[in-house]
Image (cartoon, rainbow, N blue to C red):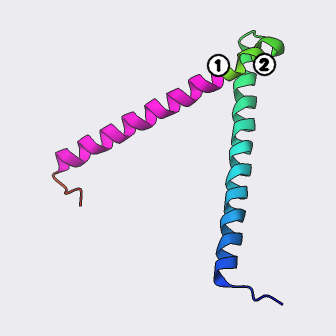
Amino acid sequence: MAKYTREDHEKYRAEQDRKAKKAQQEQDERREKIQVRAAWLSDGGNRDTFEAEWPRLRRELHSSRIQKADERLDRARQEQRASGLSSI
């Protein structure tokens, strides 16, 4: 019988972490789609149009999140420079 090694355990944990991350991402995407669909419908849109537009909307949301993250990073850098704290 083969011995269960530390490397085996690390591989197992890495795979479990990968699966959990993927499941969380899928859940987040489903939640986001539900929220955007609700807003779309409340603004007078219909389901068929939403489904056709969803890929474009998702790309726009992704781009918006990236832009906001970049802006936060730039502000944090400016604040750090203004404070005189070292980056080390």
The amino acid type, in three-letter code, at marker 2 is Glu
Query: On residue 56, which mark appears?
Result: 1
**Is residue 51 found inside the magenta-colored segment of the image?**
no
Q: Residue 8 lies in what quarter of the image?
A: bottom right
Q: Residue at x 72, y 64 (%)?
A: 16
Examine the rendering and report whether any part of residue 76 can be seen: yes
In the image: residue 77, left or right of residue 62: left
Examine the rendering and report whether any part of residue 41 can be seen: no
User: Magenta residues, as a range?
Assistant: 56-83
Say which of 40 and 63 sits in front. Answer: 63
Q: Which residue is mark 2?
A: 51
Say which of 50 and 43 sits in front. Answer: 50
Earlier residue among tags 1 and 2:
2
- In percent of width and height, residue 27 lies at 74, 44
Say which of 10 and 81 sits in front. Answer: 10
Cβ atoms under marks 1 and 2 closer than 8 Å: no
